[in-house]
Amino acid sequence: MSDPARDRFFAIQAVRIAGVVQVVIGMLIAAESIALPAWAGYVLLANGLIDTFVIPLLLARRWRSPR
């Protein structure tokens, strides 16, 4: 049997790691190290920042156990 708290913890951490990866790739695109339009890098950068800082808080709030 799987512990729901453990699964939720790993889901939140996976979202954070994916956000950091998006930020790094977005910075590489914006710095023209990867041959894509700069606007794509900025979009990926913004999405990665949201995934890193906002989404984990929303998930934690939603999954908070009732008191």
Image (cartoon, rainbow, N blue to C red):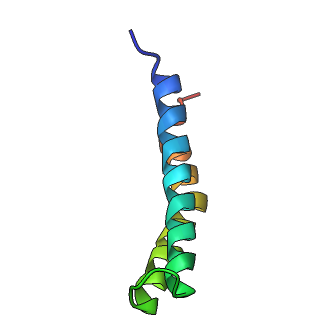
Q: Which of 52/41 is in front? A: 41
Where residue 14 sits: x, y (%)? 49, 44
Identified at 53% across, 29% down, the residue is 66
State whether residue 33 is above or below residue 18.
below
Residue 64, picture quadrant: top right
At a point 45% along the width and 23% down the height, the residue shown is: 4
Q: Position of residue 58 (x, y in %)?
A: 52, 52
Q: How many marks?
A: 0
Q: Residue at x 49, y 54 (%)?
A: 18
Camera-side residue of 61 and 28: 28
- Please indicate whether residue 9 sits to the left or right of residue 1 in the image: right
Looking at the image, which residue is at 50% across and 70% down?
A: 25
Q: Of residues 55 and 39, which is closer to you in this image?
A: 39
Q: Check the image and name the residue furthest to the top.
A: 1
Residue 44: x, y in percent? Answer: 45, 75
Q: In the rendered view of the protein, which quadrant contains the N terminus?
A: top left
Which image quarter is the C terminus in?
top right
